[in-house]
Image (cartoon, rainbow, N blue to C red):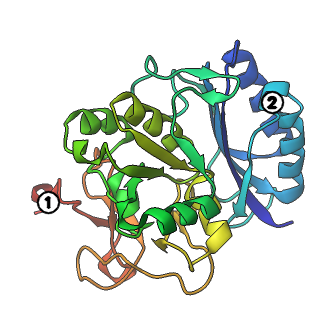
Amino acid sequence: MPAKILLYYLFTPIADPEAIRLWQRDLCELLGLRGRILLSEHGINGTVGGDMQALKRYVRKTKDYAPFKGIDFKWSSGSGLDAEGRSLDFPRMSVKVRDEIVSFGAPGELRVDENGVVGGGTHLTPGALHKLVEERGDEVVFFDGRNAFEAAIGRFRNAIVPDVATTRDFIAELDSGRYDDLKGRPVVTYCTGGIRCEVLSSLMTARGFGEVYQLDGGIVRYGETFGNAGLWEGSLYVFDGRESMTFGDGAAVISRCAACESPTDRMVDCVDETCQVRVVLCAGCGDVHPCGRHAAVAA
């Protein structure tokens, strides 16, 4: 059976996240799935892998729960299955309850109702995004809602990439004032599957950014629509065993090895074990490297 991966989220009020955790854990174990699911009073955020038939059953069962009926599941190809038919892209199945389903460190700022995040940016389909760019040209600003290291191997053309090592850094970054000049321009936030921009766009709107959009379905949905022929350049960093993916043959390689400057989209861990940043490094230059923040440690 073909190995597949599902990426999904939904912001909706959940009265008893712990009960949903137990149900989702048992369902995934029954179907032989692996991956990560986070739950909170604000909704669900998951990435799960396995064979296609098991994942189809998972989608059906999850959508049977009325609050989750509207989940938009995004499919992509996995690396493969082991002898027991389990995904090679995840070591185990993890289902947890947290204060946030995406960790901005601001659960008190987030408001969610049955329609999703309250006060977030206007959703743009990939086609609507192109129309906005055609109509407004260089006035449009692409704002990367991911960690800076993810953008090293792929990003939208001319995008602003905030210098953040974790999602929790965005609050201080926005409050610093260094992006205040964008408050009068159309700002399009984007991230891998869309979830981080749901929260980021609401935080930006609350801080006075007057025209904020979010790419509906994230980079994944955009790549499914336009492949390598649109405004996206390079590879997409993903948080599973694949580490990166592209949207068809001929994807541009926009990143260079931190050691020898050769073109590559291969990423490795920083040499410091406490560092959460990853570094672009070609296969010929090894498996660990200082990220810049820890160059002195390696020396």
User: In terms of depth relative to the viewer, which is nearer, 239 or 84?
Assistant: 239
The percent position of residue 289, horizontal first and vertical second, equals: 26, 65
Q: Which element type, helix, strand or loop, lies under badge 2?
A: helix
Name the residue located 43 percent from the left edge and 43 percent from the top edge: 211
Local crowd at mark 2 within 10 Å, few (<14), some, or many (≥20)?
A: few
Q: Please name the residue shown 75% across and 40% down the image.
A: 71
Which residue in the protein does label 2 denote?
Answer: 26
Density class for disc 1 (Cα within 10 Å; few <14, some 14-19, many ≥20) is few
Q: Is residue 97 left or right of residue 232?
A: right
The quadrant holding residue 173 is top left
Q: On residue 122, which mark appears?
A: none
For badge 1, the amino acid type reads Ala
Residue type at tag 2:
Asp
Residue at 54% x, 23% y is 98
- Residue 46 place in picture, x, y as percent: 65, 41
Q: Which residue is denoted by mark 1 in the rendering?
A: 295
Kindly give the residue lying farthest to the top in the view shown: 15
The picture places residue 9, in percent across and down from the top left corner, at: 65, 39
Element under label 1? helix
Viewport quadrant of the N terminus: bottom right
Between 278 and 147, the one lying in front of the other is 147
Q: Position of residue 76 (x, y in %)?
A: 70, 62
**Location of the C terminus (image quadrant):** bottom left
The mark tally for this picture is 2
